[in-house]
Image (cartoon, rainbow, N blue to C red):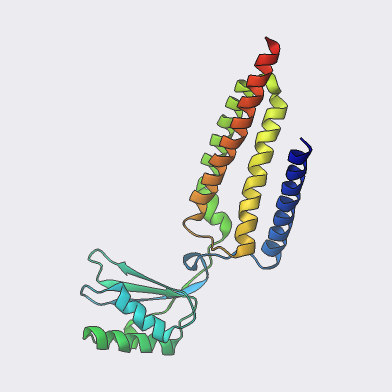
Amino acid sequence: MKEISLKTKILAIVIAIVIIVGTIVTVTTGLNFDLRYQEAKRIQLYLEKDFEIADIKKITDEILPNQPVMIQKVEVFEDMVSILAKDITEKQKEDIINKVNEKYGKELTVESVEITKIPHTRGRDIIKPYIVPFMVATIIILVYMAIRYYKLGIFATIAKTVGLLIITEATLLSIMAITRIPIGRVTIPLVLAVYVLSLLGITTKLEKKLAKKKEEEK
């Protein structure tokens, strides 16, 4: 029992340190957002023919070195390329156009291609569509657990469940902040996965306690 208690204390200390450090990193440095959510610049080139993203990638690697670049096919027939990067200067735009013209036999001009500034997407705007469904689902789950485990104490059950969910999600976000894992399309699925696993963990513990209590009442 002492060994389990010691392990629990060590785990609690580690989690507390992770959350504190993660909070400090978030406040001082901010979270690391995926390129599509950062303030960036984009150019679009209408090639009017099929092309390989790998070929465009070779061009951008040469002209836009040492920075992440996102290349996508756009338009219905996927004959236009979108190039998104942290920064694209007029000179770099001209170099890209010249390389693309040379590669695909086009006559694109610098004047026909604009550099579009993409504003930074705030974290709250990313999670906004999920807030209401998440809250509704959580309320339903808490009501169910309060009914299911009322013998263990309604307030205690709800408090433990909410506390565990908050701690696990805070730990996840803190780890992402510390390790600089980008906030992107996989973030919400990851948060939901941790949410579900946390519920499974607390449910398993509550089921064991409930079974033990029923045995004691016999």
Q: Quadrant of residue 160?
A: top right
> Is 61 placed left or right of 25 in the picture?
left
Instruction: Name the quarter where the N terminus is drawn.
Output: top right
Write the residue at 68% across / 29% down. Answer: 157
Query: Residue 109, relative to residue 160: is it above or below?
Result: below
Q: Quadrant of residue 166?
A: top right
Indicate the position of residue 13 as horizontal and vertical percent values.
76, 50
Query: Residue 116, relative to residue 142: is it above or below?
Result: below
Looking at the picture, tell me which residue is in the foreground, 162 or 210.
210
Query: Residue 186, relative to residue 68: is it above or below?
Result: above
Looking at the picture, tell me which residue is in the foreground, 174 or 17.
17
- Residue furthest to the top in view is 218
> Is 1 placed left or right of 208 in the picture?
right
Instruction: Name the quarter where the C terminus is drawn.
Output: top right
Query: Residue 142, relative to residue 64: is it above or below?
Result: above
Indicate the position of residue 106 as horizontal and vertical percent values.
23, 85
Indicate the position of residue 180 as horizontal and vertical percent values.
59, 65
Write the residue at 49% across / 73% down. Answer: 40
Looking at the picture, tell me which residue is in the foreground, 117 or 218.
218
Write the residue at 24% across / 74% down. Answer: 51
Write the residue at 60% across / 22% down. Answer: 148
Indicate the position of residue 70 as horizontal and vertical percent values.
41, 71
